[in-house]
Structures are given as structure tokens and as C-alpha cells.
Image: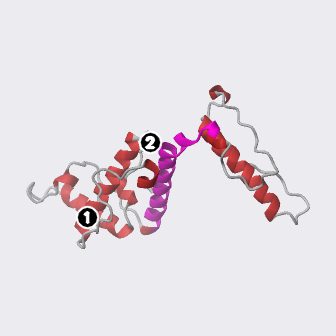
């Protein structure tokens, strides 16, 4: 997805790489790839400082990560035996149950997706592209967009275009899907 949206592959991540069979090596590889992904998104303008790469791992690899971090933080192990990658982090990892981890992981993946859309997609949406967006009913006109940047202190022009289009499509499909109901209240996405 990142390759498609950005136009080039992520630097340092080979295409179609096979993960190692050993759990600790797979954990290191996935952490490294997730860190590169977050760094790439940050260079594209995303806000990724709050996203922890270990929450992007599957639960079994997260447990391996916890064990590796605790081993690296252990005072009884010599410096030669410690994994330097994990010894640099000084905070103790959080022990999360599978249920809590899955909730945190889903939220983290949604954050990554939203930041990806923000940095790689929203910049392409312009008032000119708004006219070319697909609409469900060609007989109804699309609402106008106020392109004045000062008309909203919350949403940018591209975000207002996207929200207007989503509201228009939602309104049309709502009428089609719930046409048998007497009153169909008009709701907006935002």
C-alpha cells in the first residue's frame, strides 16, 4: 500500500522478503521494518511520535519482544550477552494481556493507516480533483466547496473536499437503502 501511494518502495525494506523462522530474529526484523515505516511516514509529514512499533507486532512476537527487552534490562547478564538493540531502551516494557494488546494493536494500526492517508493521500485532493470524483447519482449536483483556507480552523481544503464527498455519497445511498421508511432523518458524517 505504501509503495502504491508514495510511488516508490520503502528504503531498506526488500520486496517480498521471507521472515526468519526463529521467533527472536523474526521479532527483530518486524520491529526494524515497522520502525522504518514509521520513520518514512514521519519524513512525509505524518505525526508518528506517539506510535510504538512493538504494538504493530502480532501478539506472539510481542511476547518475544517483552522477553528480549527484559533480558536486555537485566542486571545479572553481562554486556556481551545483552542485545544492544534492546539495551538502549531504558523503560520497562508493558505486560499486556492478549485482549488488551489486541485492542491497543488495532488502535495503533488505525493510527498508522490514518497518518498514511493524511500524508500520502490528502495532499493529492484539490478543488480541481473534486470535480472528477465519482458520484452515485449524476442527476444531483455535488455541493460547492469553500476553498478559502480561513473558512475552517479545523479542516484543511483537502479534508473538507473529502468530507463533503463522503457526506454526499452517504446521503444518496441512505435514501436508496432506507427508501421504504417514512422519515429518513438526514445525518452527516461530520
* Residue that numbered label 1 is attached to: 67
In the picture provided, is 170 more to the left or to the right than 120?
right
Position of residue 131 relative to residue 55, above or below, is above
Does the magenta run of residues contain 165? no
What is the CA distance from the residue labelled 2 to the residue labelled 1?
30 Å
The answer to whether the residue labelled 2 contacts the one labelled 1, judged by CB atoms less than 8 Å apart, is no
Position of residue 54 relative to residue 164, above or below, is below
User: What secondary structure is marked by label 2?
Assistant: loop
Q: Is residue 10 visible?
A: yes
Q: Is residue 189 visible?
A: no
In the picture provided, is 127 more to the left or to the right than 68?
right
**Picture residue at 38% right of the left edge, 67% below the top:** 59
How many discs appear? 2
Position of residue 89 relative to residue 99, above or below, is above
**Picture residue at 22% right of the left edge, 54% below the top:** 86
Q: Which residues are magenta?
A: 99-128
Q: Nearer the viewer, residue 180 or 99?
A: 180
Residue 101 position by quadrant: bottom left
**Picture residue at 34% right of the left edge, 70% below the top:** 60
- Point out the residue furthest to the right here: 182
Residue 162 position by quadrant: top right
Q: Nearer the viewer, residue 105 or 150?
A: 150
User: What secondary structure is marked by label 1?
Assistant: helix
Which dot marks residue 46?
Answer: 2
For the stretch drawn in magenta, the main secondary structure is helix
Does the magenta run of residues contain 109? yes
First along the sequence among labels 2 and 1: 2
Position of residue 112 relative to residue 151, above or below, is below
Question: Could you say where residue 121 lies in the image, as x and y percent from the top left?
Answer: 52, 46
Question: Could you say where residue 88 lies in the image, as x and y percent from the top left?
Answer: 21, 48
Amino acid at each position: 500500500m505504501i509503495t502504491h501511494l508514495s510511488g516508490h518502495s520503502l528504503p531498506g525494506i526488500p520486496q517480498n522478503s521471507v521472515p526468519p523462522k526463529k521467533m527472536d530474529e523474526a521479532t527483530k526484523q518486524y520491529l526494524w521494518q515497522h520502525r522504518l515505516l514509521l520513520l518514512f511516514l514521519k519524513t512525509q509529514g505524518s505525526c508518528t511520535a506517539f506510535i510504538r512499533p512493538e504494538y504493530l507486532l502480532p501478539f506472539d512476537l510481542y511476547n518475544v519482544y517483552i522477553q528480549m527487552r527484559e533480558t536486555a534490562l537485566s542486571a545479572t547478564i553481562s554486556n556481551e550477552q545483552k542485545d544492544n538493540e534492546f539495551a538502549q531502551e531504558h523503560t520497562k516494557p508493558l505486560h499486556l494481556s492478549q485482549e488488551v494488546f489486541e485492542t491497543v494493536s488495532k488502535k495503533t494500526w488505525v493510527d498508522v493507516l490514518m497518518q498514511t492517508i493524511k500524508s500520502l493521500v490528502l495532499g493529492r485532493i484539490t478543488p480541481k480533483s473534486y470535480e472528477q470524483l465519482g458520484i452515485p447519482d449524476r442527476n444531483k449536483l455535488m455541493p460547492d466547496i469553500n476553498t478559502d483556507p480561513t473558512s475552517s480552523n479545523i479542516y484543511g481544503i483537502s479534508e473538507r473536499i473529502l468530507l463533503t464527498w463522503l457526506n454526499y455519497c452517504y446521503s444518496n445511498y441512505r435514501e436508496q437503502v432506507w427508501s421504504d421508511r417514512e422519515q429518513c432523518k438526514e445525518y452527516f458524517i461530520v
